[in-house]
Amino acid sequence: MGSERVLVTGPQGIKDILQLETYKFEKPRAVRAILQGILGDGLVTAEGQNHKNQRRLLQPAFKFKQIKDNYPTFWKKSLEFIDQLNNVPDTVDVVPLLSRPTLDIIGAAGFGMDFKSVAHPDNEMTKNYATGFNSSKSAQRRRLLGFLLPAWLLNILPLKRNRELNIALNTIRKTIAGLLDDRKVGLQSGETPSDILSAIMSSGVLDSEALTHECMTVEVTTDPERIRQEVRSNIASPDCELAAAVAAVDDLKYTSAVVSEALRLHAPVHMLQRIAKQKLTVSGVPCPKGTNFRISIWALNHSPGRWSSDPLKFDLDRWLLDTAGGAADLYSFNTFSHGPRACIGERFARAEMLVMIAALVGRYNVEFVGTGETVNPNPDEARIEIGVTTKFEGGLHLKLRRVDGW
């Protein structure tokens, strides 16, 4: 078996791996083991025909109409979140705070259940969610071991992180199992709720174990004044009629550009890795079975030759002047990947970000003041920590000042 490592940077190579020959590749064993330890055997970790089948069944639940039906949930939870900010210090690390409305939105829009994370951040579900997805030192050590040991051995080692994960994920899975039972009863009685879980089950996915894995898988400050003006000109007040606020969301073009540019510059996943399952040709180059291909999302999203303006600059005009951001080709923006394995939740993620930013900046002036335990002397620098996902090292400290009139 080959052991070559290839960094793929050309559009044809990316197209070959992500779109044309997707199922001739698979994620490396160590990467799958790390993800399965958190997400189970859902869409992200599935391979081959199993992945095709899961994607076909899940796709209808993530169509634009289904996501739009959940805009009211996004808006109500975002308002609940900004109301809670009245009780936090003027300068605060927003990273742990933002996980609370995110969890509530996933619960409500995804499963039709309010986890009450915003109102009660110390409840069992919230604490276990935070534990399952944290980036502690023990979590980092376990990730490193995942590249050295087989999954079965990694999972039975007496590691602190294994104990944390087992407790957290068992609690979350029990909660989801209860949701599945309730939803089955509701669907059999003719209910038609708009949450994603019900849409998935209505499409024919009724296996509780498979659904549990999918549920485990579902899971920003340059010119706040301009964002605020756009939000307030389209939404008279946060307490206006819900239907009017929801209808205005798609008109927030500048705020939408902020979302796109933030996702381009700070992609949550920095790299894709694939192993060739057979001998094949990529970009006209013969590659043996076992070749390890790496696609750097960060490098492509920041590549000088792929964007019409300076790709290292936070430039909203690139999206306001061109819906493709001035990209040279489809594969210049890789935050959500492409092809059959592209992120199925892209629309959900974009809509959630858009609504939460609109609510936050509509009410508050937001100023970045640093990361970590002490304030960073250079306010333009945010240190990035790279793990399974990319995160701000030490946190993201913002100064919040309420702006009257909304």
Image: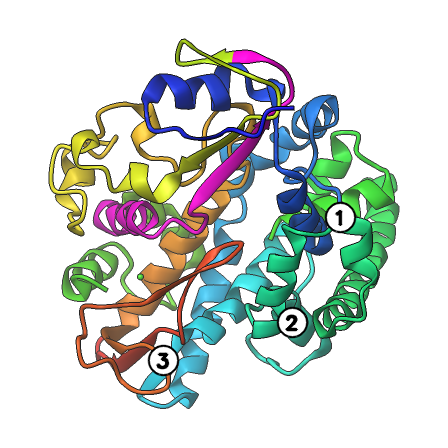
- Picture residue at 33% right of the left edge, 21% below the top: 11
Query: Three-letter amino acid code at disc 1?
Result: Pro
Query: Three-letter amino acid code at disc 3?
Result: Gly
3D distance between C-alphas at marks 1 and 3:
34 Å
SS at mark 3 in the image: loop
Q: Is residue 256 magenta?
A: yes
Up the image or down, 189 lies above or below 383; here it is: above
Q: Earlier in the sequence, mark 1 or mark 2?
A: 2
- Picture residue at 75% right of the left edge, 48% below the top: 150
User: Disc 1 or disc 2, which is closer to the eye?
Assistant: 1
3D distance between C-alphas at marks 2 and 3:
20 Å
Q: Residues within 10 Å of mark 2 (few under 14, many from 20)?
A: some
Query: Is the Cβ of the residue at disc 2 closer than 8 Å to that at disc 3?
Result: no
Q: Quadrant of the N terminus?
A: top right
Residue ID for mark 3: 372
Q: Earlier in the sequence, mark 2 or mark 3?
A: 2
Residue ID for mark 1: 150
Residue 190 showing in the rendered view: yes
* Residue 112 occupies quadrant: bottom right
Location of residue 321 in the rendering, given as x and y in whole percent from the top left corner: 14, 34
Q: Which residues are magenta?
A: 252-280
